[in-house]
Image (cartoon, coloured by chain):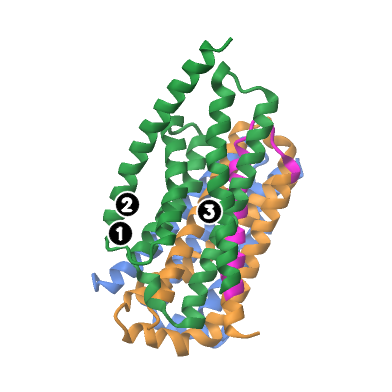
Amino acid sequence: MPLLVIGHIIGTVLGAGAATFAEILHMRAMRDGVIDPEESATLKVTYRILRIGLFIAIITGFGFLLYFRFVSGHTEILYSEKLWAKMTIVLLIPLNAFLLQMRRIPFWLGSSISLTAWYAAIILGVYRGVPLSYLEILGIFAAAVLVMAAVLVLIRKSYYKIASIKP
Amino acid sequence: MSFGFAIAAHVILGLCGLASSYAVVLNLRKRELPRGFLKTFSLIAFLSYAASWATAAYYYVLLYGKAVKPVILAGKYPWAHTIFMESKEHIFLLIPFLSLLTAAIIWFLGNRLQSDESLRSATAALALVTFLIGVFVTIAGVLISGAVR
Amino acid sequence: MPHTRTITAFLISGIVTAIFIAAITIGGELAPAFKDWLKTTFYHHWLGKGALAVILFFVLGILLSFIAPRSDSALASSARALTWVSILSALVILGFFTAEAFHLF
């Protein structure tokens, strides 16, 4: 069990950290409107770390489910609404990445979903007793995505303004 | 092989297959196709699914029917077996063929994928449907396990 | 190109196999005697369905490789058709067991 916890934390740290830095690096790269080869290479490495983190987090996450089923016998956890909300949000991460790559969703929405999903998964993982239903959690998540999108747009606007003023 | 080990192997191998199918889908959409990467991960996908099938068979045939199924059917969530296990065990049968054919296209016609957009998108669609069916199978597995009380 | 024809053949075989999987699944539930035959012949009905699907896929694929179209467009079309047939097969199987669980027939 401790190994699973450590592995899950490592996966989450890598994934959430990489998602955060991907956003920062993308913003920085786009200050001149063009992503040059060096910036693109750095972003590629960041996305690779993100996917490795996601894979580790998912494998260890399922390790927990196997532990609950075959070791501790607490199978009722597998029907917890908090768990299902977390799994739904985590599933959104690769689906969102696919839609972003296919240019089926706008960047402002895709980047917001990615960041919000990682931090929502962390919050849901840390809090033991979340007294909310599956739909309530997803409703709050959807609202958080929109708030995050607005915050990111504001940050980008002020950053590009400062970047354009600097000599 | 213990049943616990078999089911753990089944889950982990299935997830490796899913991750590999997903990697194939994403990389088929790149401007410059990484052929070596695609060959490696399409093969890993097929082998992972095949091994997941074998370990599932060991658990399902020798234990599930006599020791787990009656518990689920007698419990609060009998639909976990009647709908999700019954569907999962049959829908899963599609996956090895889909992943084998995806790998075959990449391995034997990989040189055409760069220039033939129609073939490339058709192959990506195959890998994507493999991934989506695999996601359903995984979710069903969680529902089934959770019904064993 | 020999690979084009062979892979097209196996894609078509995959389409037939996907339909077969749905058919044998439903057939096994509606005809208990057939399910019993699978159990007797293959030790377990699910093993039997898997074995028959594998046999069908490879035998049909090999046979079709002598007559399958050689064109690139047929190859891509077959792959797309297999995608759709697989989705439909999965939905039919899920729909069948859901309907059966709710005693809709």
Distance between the alpha carbons at the discs numbered 1 and 3: 24 Å
Question: Residue at image x 54%, y 83%?
Answer: B61
Is C33 situated left or right of A81 in this image? right
Of B118 and B72, nearer the camera is B72
**Dominant SS in magenta:** helix
Q: Are marks 1 and 2 on the same chain?
A: yes
Query: Would you name the residue on which mark 1 appears?
Result: A134
Of B96 and C15, nearer the camera is B96
Distance between the alpha carbons at the discs numbered 2 and 3: 23 Å
Q: Colour of chain A?
A: green
Distance between the alpha carbons at the discs numbered 1 and 2: 6 Å
Query: Would you name the residue on which mark 2 appears?
Result: A138
Q: Are marks 1 and 2 in contact (CB under 8 Å)?
A: yes
Query: Would you name the residue on which mark 3 appears?
Result: B131
Of B30 and C2, nearer the camera is B30
How many marks the image carries: the answer is: 3
Question: Residue at image x 53%, y 48%?
Answer: A16
Q: Quadrant of the C terminus of chain B?
A: bottom left
What kind of element bears circle 2? helix
Residue occupying the far bottom of the picture? B66
The segment highlighted magenta reads B8-36
Q: Colour of chain B?
A: orange
Whether B148 is among the magenta residues is no
Is C38 situated left or right of A41 in this image? left
